Each structure stands twice: as structure tokens, then as C-alpha cells.
Image (cartoon, rainbow, N blue to C red):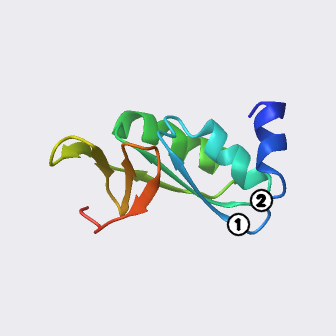
Amino acid sequence: MHEIEAAELGDISGKRVLHLQCHIGRNTLCLVRRGAIATGLDFSNAALDVARRLSRETGLKADLVEVSAQAEGDGSTIKASPGYAIDNRGRIRRCEVTR
């Protein structure tokens, strides 16, 4: 995680953080190292396998979840299960879990 990102986040100790498109989990695990309770989402099971290995090797625990992403309706909402969506204005919304 870059210094500017860490400064913008501030103190995240004990806070629940959702990291979309976590890939191999490096930043997700950095969030855990800084005290967050982190969940990383990604659509690549291969990348998540690496993230899980890094989690085991470092002893940093994060929920690492494979999700699917699809456009709904007129394409203005992208849904990423489990339970969150990003609308066309960049807002994160809660939605039904579709695992």
C-alpha cells in the first residue's frame, strides 16, 4: 500500500473493510496488518489461491472470496456477489447475496 493511500484511510484498526478486485491480496493483507478486519473480493480463483497462500505464509487473516460480476437491467449497476453492488455513480450498495 502506498503512503498516500494509507494517509487517506487513516486509522482503520478494528474497522471492517471490503476490498474489491483484491487480486493476489497484497493490499488486503496490508489492511489487516494495519488492524482492519478485511474481506477481499475477486473474480479470479487463481489469484485468490495466491492470496490465500500469502495469508497463510504471513499469518495475516482475511476473508478472500471469489465473486462474479455482471451488469443488471440497463447496465447501470454492476453486481458483485456476495452482497454488494456498485452503481453508475460509483456508490456501493448492499444487495442480495447470490453466491
Q: Residue at x 84, y 32 (%)?
A: 3
Q: Note whether 98 is above or below 26 in the view shown.
A: below
Say which element carries label 2: loop
Quadrant for the N terminus in the image: top right
Q: Note whether 8 is above or below 83 in the view shown.
A: above
Image quadrant where residue 70 sits: top left
Q: Specify whether 32 is left or right of 65.
A: right
Image coords of residue 42 (percent x, y): 41, 42
- The residue closer to the viewer here, 54 or 70, is 70
- Numbered mark located on residue 12 in the image: 2
Image coords of residue 91 (percent x, y): 47, 51
Q: Residue at x 83, y 52 (%)?
A: 10
Measured in 3D between alpha carbons, the distance from the residue under mark 1 to the one under mark 2, in whole angstroms, is: 5 Å
Q: Note whether 4 is above or below 42 in the view shown.
A: above
Image coords of residue 62 (percent x, y): 59, 57
Q: Specify whether 86 is left or right of 96.
A: right
Say which element carries label 1: loop
Asked if labels 2 and 1 touch by Cβ distance under 8 angstroms, the answer is yes
Which three-letter amino acid code belongs to the residue tagged 1?
Lys
- Numbered mark located on residue 30 in the image: none
Quadrant for the C terminus in the image: bottom left
Q: Which residue is mark 1?
A: 15
Which three-letter amino acid code belongs to the residue tagged 2?
Ile
Q: Label 2 neighbourhood size at 10 Å, few (<14), some (14-19), many (20+)?
A: some
